[in-house]
Image (spheres, grey):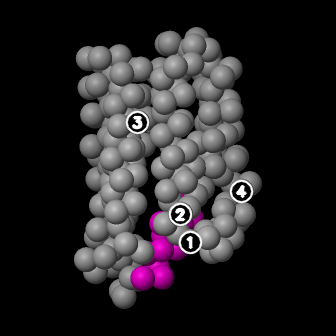
Amino acid sequence: MNRIVRFSLSLLPLMITSGMFYSVLPIYISRELNASETAVGSLFTVGALTGALISICVGRISDRFGRKRTIVISKVCFGLVVLLYSIITDYIFAYPIHILEGFAWAMVGVSAPAYISEVGERKGESLGIYNTVVHVGWVVGPIFGGFLAEIFGFRVMLRLAFVLIILGLFAVLKFEE
């Protein structure tokens, strides 16, 4: 069970970042990138559609090349997503970023539970530990992201999210498979 806890905790920085990112992203896109509400909705649709279209393929990649590699690639992609968001000046540039975001979510969304169900002795409890970490990230992330965006601005918040993702990347790289 310690292996599941360590693995799940290695994903905590990504989950905090996702809570930060998704809770303030619509405001950022509207205010700073001048997008309408429909454009904001369409951006999220593009990311979700990407994930839906490639999840099976990503699952095959994860089966073939390993869960850890897939999760590492996912974290690198997420890092690029928040970093790119911190430098764009118009929402039109967010569409390819959201395609990358959908790809990254599909990778972690398929690979992390697959890993846990493979190595966890008690499957339900193992997935419960993982889901607890996901939810803790989503408890901490939105208030932290909102605070940082309010005090320092959206772009600084996004760059700090990038730093968190890098810390999480090192944690998962250090984790033995």
Which stretch is magenta?
108-119
The residue sitting at 56% across, 71% down in the picture is: 66
The dominant secondary structure in magenta is: helix
Residues 4 and 141: in front is 4
Q: Which residue is mark 4?
A: 54
Which quadrant would the N terminus be assigned to in this image? Answer: bottom left
Badge 3 amino acid: Phe
- In 3D space, how far apart are the residues under numbered discs 2 and 4 (Cα atoms)? 17 Å
The reply to whether discs 4 and 3 touch (Cβ–Cβ < 8 Å) is: no
Q: Amino acid at mark 1?
A: Gly
Question: Which numbered tag is attached to residue 69?
Answer: 2
Q: Which disc, if any, is residue 66?
A: 1
Q: Is residue 161 left or right of residue 72?
A: left
User: Secondary structure beneath disc 3?
Assistant: helix
Name which residue lies at 69% across and 70% down.
Answer: 60
**Label 1: which secondary element:** loop
The three-letter amino acid code for the residue at tag 2 is Arg
Residue placed farthest to the bottom in the image?
121
- Inter-mark Cα distance, 3 to 1: 24 Å
Front residue of 124/93: it is 93
Kind of residue indicated by mark 4: Ile
Asked if residue 134 is positioned above or below residue 77 in the image, the reply reads: below
